[in-house]
Image (spheres, rainbow, N blue to C red):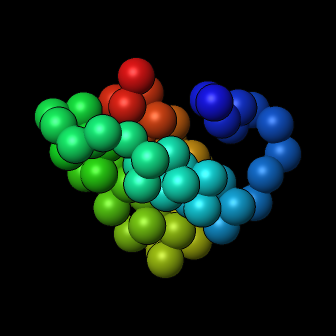
Amino acid sequence: MTPDFNKPMSAHDAIQLVKAMWDNAPAGPKKDASFLHYQAAEIAARTMNDTQTYRQLEAASQALR
């Protein structure tokens, strides 16, 4: 399942969705790359930067493909 970040979704819900995808992904370089974007999304969310949060979450989900 690939999340559609163009549909209305709170940043918190989007983070949880990508975290679930990351948790279920097999170990490897794709998961490692995705985790870096996920961490950046968490930082952006803490600073209330929704635009950057969604960008990083999209990059995290793309990295898992």
The reply, left or right, for residue 25 in relation to residue 52 is left
Furthest-right residue in view?
8
Relative image position of residue 53 (x, y in whole percent): 52, 54
Q: Nearer the viewer, residue 15 or 43?
A: 15
Residue 36 visible to an observer of this rendering: yes
Relative image position of residue 40 (x, y in whole percent): 34, 58
Residue 11 visible to an observer of this rendering: no
Instruction: Say which quarter of the image contains residue 1.
Output: top right
Q: Residue at x 29, y 51 (%)?
A: 35
Q: How many marks?
A: 0
Q: Nearer the viewer, residue 33 or 44?
A: 33
Q: Residue at x 22, y 43 (%)?
A: 27
Instruction: Say which quarter of the image contains residue 3.
Output: top right
Relative image position of residue 19 (x, y in whole percent): 49, 57
Q: Quadrant of the C terminus?
A: top left
Name above or below for residue 7 compared with residue 39. Answer: above
Relative image position of residue 61 (x, y in whole percent): 47, 35
Furthest-bottom residue in view?
46
The reply, left or right, for residue 51 in relation to residue 62 is right
The reply, left or right, for residue 33 in relation to residue 45 is left
